[in-house]
Image (cartoon, coloured by chain):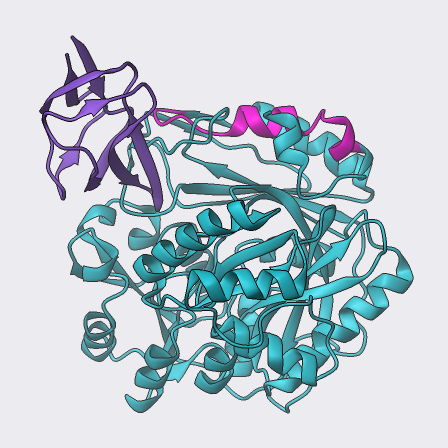
Chain colours: A purple, B cyan
């Protein structure tokens, strides 16, 4: 079980992956936006995207859980 | 002179415009979003009007809310700063239609330069050198491939309505072009509301050199020297200097003349910047774009000329002569600007947060244009610029020495910031020698 967390305060601009997807290390899960910059949030290991904890338009704080990969 | 001015911007630039207004006895009106209520510019203006919630579309980009604030405070003029609505032709027109003075160029000049393809074509006709590239918008991938074949690789792909380096990337062959085109098109639609794409011949070793121009009330256009902005990350400037260490007297003369010609071609009024790419090997330069507004890095020009550019903007807007001899501009010494961004100094990722400590350097040759102070919150809604650290010296070496001390003395705690990057830059051999190009940051942070 791997948890993917936000590195900074940001808005969730785009949710790219879908729960249940098979993801590879380095796949883009979600794209955040902060300070006029898009920040892709990547899977850090291969597995199944068990849970997405954010939706487009959400505001995440540093350390917030974005996705769980199992 | 103008009686009052509404500053349609935020952060350091709003504060900087307000400072000159105050010095000249012009009543200043700040507008601010809910996110910015505690920032210094709101307090330092004579009046301040809350115009909306934090997202720019509902505040600093909301022309209706800004014009309502101008009516409410009986402001006589609008200064747009940079970014936001500063290069929005329709907004400039609305301001003038409301009977207010627009502190900037004519809406027509903004429109002509805002479309980069139109601007390129116009510059070419005016005798300003342009790179081999698109003369009309490229709308699909196959057209982009054909256009790249015609121009010859490598090519730069960018948004025709864009700016700020957003969506811009280079392609060395057809495979890379597909990706570059798709990236540029998505970003162009999202950020600039237009999918039009432009391709240009890419220069391998280039310096980004720009000319500060001023269009006077009597119609003359003068050049106030150049700035070198080759220190960039993600095609966005991080540090600037004037004069450019890569420009000799002959190239400078041609550059400044080209800048003036560019301004004359659109009947330019007020402060503007004509950007060029200078090929390091051939010493040839080509027109990149024109920014029809005050530029972020304008302080370096002010430091070497002694001219307050915002004051000149106010004078020109009021139809008055400028406060300097237009034929006798003679820059002296050397100035650099270091943009202090709320971002980590290695990967350059944004880092919003609360500022718990803020101690800025001061002393001879040091100028800090800051948008924040201790206790402020840096929010994710706007660009990461916290402050501009500007240094002046009689020589480049003296300025670099002062810059090292100033960077070391600048303390910001809370959000991560790029001061450590500037410390590294100031001991980087290519940068210190002056022999650097737009790849200098990539060399420092491989």
Identify the image quadrant of the C terminus of chain B: top right
Q: Is residue B275 visible?
A: no
Is residue A47 placed above or below B301 in the rendered structure? above
Query: Who is closer to the viewer here, B104 or B173?
Result: B173
Query: Who is closer to the viewer here, B108 or B357?
Result: B108
Query: Who is closer to the viewer here, B332 or B435?
Result: B435
Residue at image position (29%, 54%) is: B42
Is residue A69 placed above or below B274 in the rendered structure? above
Which of the 4 image quadrants contains residue B406? top right
Which of the 4 image quadrants contains residue B375? top left
Is residue B403 placed above or below B92 in the rendered structure? above
Is residue A70 placed above or below B173 in the rendered structure? above
| Residue B269 % position (x, y) | 57, 82
Residue at image position (61%, 80%) is: B121
Q: In this view, does B155 lie to the left or right of A45?
A: right
| Residue B364 % position (x, y) | 68, 39
Does the magenta segment cover residue B418?
Answer: yes
Query: Who is closer to the viewer here, A24 or B66?
Result: A24
Q: What stretch is highlighted in magenta?
A: B413-432
Labels in figure, total: 0
Residue at image position (35%, 68%) is: B194
Q: In this view, does A24 lie to the left or right of B26?
A: left
| Residue B387 % position (x, y) | 47, 42
């Amino acid at each position: 079980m791997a948890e993917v967390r936000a590195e900074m305060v940001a808005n969730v601009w785009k949710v790219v992956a879908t729960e249940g997807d098979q993801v590879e290390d380095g796949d883009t899960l979600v794209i955040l936006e902060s300070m006029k910059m898009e920040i892709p949030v990547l899977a850090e290991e291969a597995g199944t995207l068990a849970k997405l904890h954010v939706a487009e338009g959400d505001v995440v704080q540093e350390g917030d859980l974005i996705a769980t990969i199992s | 002179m103008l009686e009052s001015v509404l500053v349609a911007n935020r952060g350091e630039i709003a504060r900087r415009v307000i400072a000159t207004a105050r010095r000249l006895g012009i009543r200043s009106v700040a507008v601010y979003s809910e996110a910015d209520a505690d920032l210094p510019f709101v307090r330092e203006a004579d009046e301040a009007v809350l115009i909306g919630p934090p997202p720019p579309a509902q505040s600093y980009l909301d022309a209706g809310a800004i014009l309502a604030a101008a009516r409410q405070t009986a402001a006589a003029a609008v200064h747009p700063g940079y970014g936001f609505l500063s290069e929005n032709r329709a907004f400039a027109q609305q301001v003038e239609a409301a009977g207010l003075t627009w502190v900037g160029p004519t809406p027509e000049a903004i429109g002509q330069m805002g479309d980069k393809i139109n601007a390129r074509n116009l510059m070419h006709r005016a005798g300003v050198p342009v790179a081999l590239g698109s003369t009309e918008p490229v709308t699909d991938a196959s057209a982009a491939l054909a256009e790249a074949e015609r121009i010859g690789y490598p090519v730069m792909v960018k948004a025709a309505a864009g700016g700020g380096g957003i969506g811009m990337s280079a392609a060395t062959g057809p495979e890379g072009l597909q990706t570059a085109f798709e990236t540029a098109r998505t970003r162009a639609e999202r950020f600039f509301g237009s999918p039009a794409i432009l391709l240009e011949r890419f220069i391998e070793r280039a310096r980004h050199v720009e000319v500060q121009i001023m269009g006077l009330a009597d119609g003359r256009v003068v050049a106030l020297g150049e700035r070198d902005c080759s220190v960039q990350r993600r095609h966005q400037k991080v540090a600037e200097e004037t004069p450019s260490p890569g420009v000799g007297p002959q190239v400078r003369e041609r550059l400044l003349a080209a800048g003036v010609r560019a301004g004359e071609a659109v009947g330019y009024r007020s402060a503007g910047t004509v950007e060029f790419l200078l090929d390091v090997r051939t010493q040839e330069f080509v027109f990149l774009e024109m920014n029809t507004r005050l530029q972020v890095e304008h302080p370096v020009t002010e430091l070497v000329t002694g001219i307050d550019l915002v004051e000149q903007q106010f004078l020109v807007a009021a139809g008055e002569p400028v406060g300097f001899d237009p034929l006798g501009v003679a820059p002296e010494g050397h100035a650099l600007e270091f943009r202090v961004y709320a971002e980590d100094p290695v990967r350059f990722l944004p880092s919003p947060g609360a500022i718990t400590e803020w101690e800025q350097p001061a002393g001879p040759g040091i100028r800090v244009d800051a948008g924040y102070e201790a206790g402020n919150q840096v929010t994710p809604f706007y660009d990461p610029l916290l402050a501009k650290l500007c240094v002046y010296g009689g020589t480049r070496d003296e300025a670099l020495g002062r810059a090292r001390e100033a960077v070391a003395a600048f303390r910001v705690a809370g959000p991560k910031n790029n001061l450590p990057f500037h410390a590294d830059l100031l001991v980087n051999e290519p940068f210190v020698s002056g022999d650097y190009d737009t790849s200098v940051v990539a060399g420092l942070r491989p």
